[in-house]
Amino acid sequence: MECMIPRTDDAEAELVVRAQAGDHRAFALLVGRYQDPVFRFVLRMSGIRDEAMDLTQDTFLKAYRALPAWRPEAHFRTWLFQIAHNATLDVLRRRQRVEFVPFADDEPEGEILAVTDPAPTPEQALADRQRIGMLERALRDLPVEQREVLLLREVEDMSYAEIAVTLGIGEGTVKSRLARARVAALAHYRGHAGENSDE
Amino acid sequence: MNEHRPDMIELSAYFDGELDPVRQRGVAAHLAACPACAAQLDLLRALAADFERLPAATLGFDLAGVIEGRLAAAPRPQPRRDRGWRDLLPVSVGAAASVACGIAMGFALFGGAAAPRIAAMSVFDTMPPGSLCIGLESCYTNGAKR
């Protein structure tokens, strides 16, 4: 299985090296490149726009201070998201909104992970707009651990290896956590579809 | 069906192209013959498509300009370097000198091993013999008032 993390491309690595040497303009270019992806991620994680804006700025300031520790072997995006992720978790912990549920990665794989016969799917019955609303609700309701892994995979298009580095977990955990997150999101779909059909 | 039925973990990894090539082909073969699993895969595809349709949130302003301004006022990050033994030399010399001074003072105070232990204790006791306070006069004043 190919699980290598792509290296930072040469142009980007050059920007990072210049930033390490104190070139603020080079760092500003990196900020310009990543400000929206980082903001998108922390906004979906925190759910509060003002907080996400502060977190985004905080992420880049922390990254700047940590620049001497960056090595060309590291993928800059992954490294940056790692900082954003840690900063976001700190904020969520302070808000006491993180529900650190005992994690089920090591549990025996129960019925939730068995491929069941497909239930009637809501996607044919619901319009796109409703589906997006359901997805947003699902994301909001998912445990943080599942939400972050889904966002990094589905929105940021990270490989399992990149997600593992970003979240500081093993690739096997990424694999199982992502599957559980998808199952949970789909269950939300079904739940909301049930509510809607009851109305 | 010529392959064992994949569970959701495997199906999810298959969808992401994260299985090893042999298993990836095995799951593909299974999916071709199993409508139930193929439908599960369709659900994963639909979920991914919904993620693509999520509104793309943007920061809405040039953070780079803000950061650049703040960095101009901030000190430049210093590269880390490994500390060699030469860097630690002044610290080591200082520590050794402190220990030596401590030992010398101890000998000066107690006169070496010949000093009786009880005398040394009395020097550091907070109360003199007889429990008489030799501190502030106010101690006695307060006592008298009571």
Image: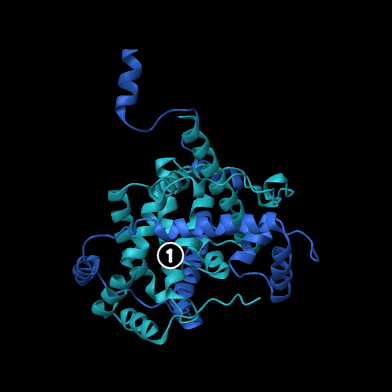
Chain colours: A cyan, B blue
Could you classify mark 1 by the number of other residues whose Cα lies within 10 Å: few (under 14), some (14-19), or many (20 or more)?
many
Q: Is residue A77 above or below residue A47?
A: below
Find residue A15 and report its horizontal and vertical position in percent: 33, 82
Q: Is residue B9 above or below residue A1?
A: above
At 59% from the left and 49% from the top, the residue drawn is A183
Residue furthest front as drawn? A125
- Residue under label 1: A81
Find residue A179 and report its horizontal and vertical position in percent: 61, 55
Q: Nearer the viewer, residue A24 or A40?
A: A40
Lateral position of residue A5 relative to residue B91, left or right: right
Lateral position of residue A19 relative to residue A137, left or right: left
- State the image quarter where residue B54 is shown: bottom left
Q: Nearer the viewer, residue B124 or A176?
A: A176
Q: Quadrant of the N terminus of chain A?
A: bottom right
Is residue A149 among what the camera can see?
A: no
Q: Nearer the viewer, residue B37 or B81?
A: B37
Q: Nearer the viewer, residue B12 or A12?
A: B12
Chain letter for the residue marked with disc 1 in the picture: A
Q: Quadrant of the C terminus of chain A?
A: top left
Q: Secondary structure at mark 1?
A: helix
At 37% from the left and 47% from the top, the residue drawn is A47
Find residue B24 and report its horizontal and vertical position in percent: 69, 71
Find residue A104 and report its horizontal and vertical position in percent: 65, 47
Residue furthest top as drawn? B146
Lateral position of residue A4 relative to residue A199, left or right: right
Q: Is residue B81 above or below residue B104?
A: below
At 36% from the left and 68% from the top, the residue drawn is A63
Q: Amino acid at mark 1?
A: Phe
- State the image quarter where residue A55 is shown: bottom left
Q: Is residue B30 above or below residue A27?
A: above
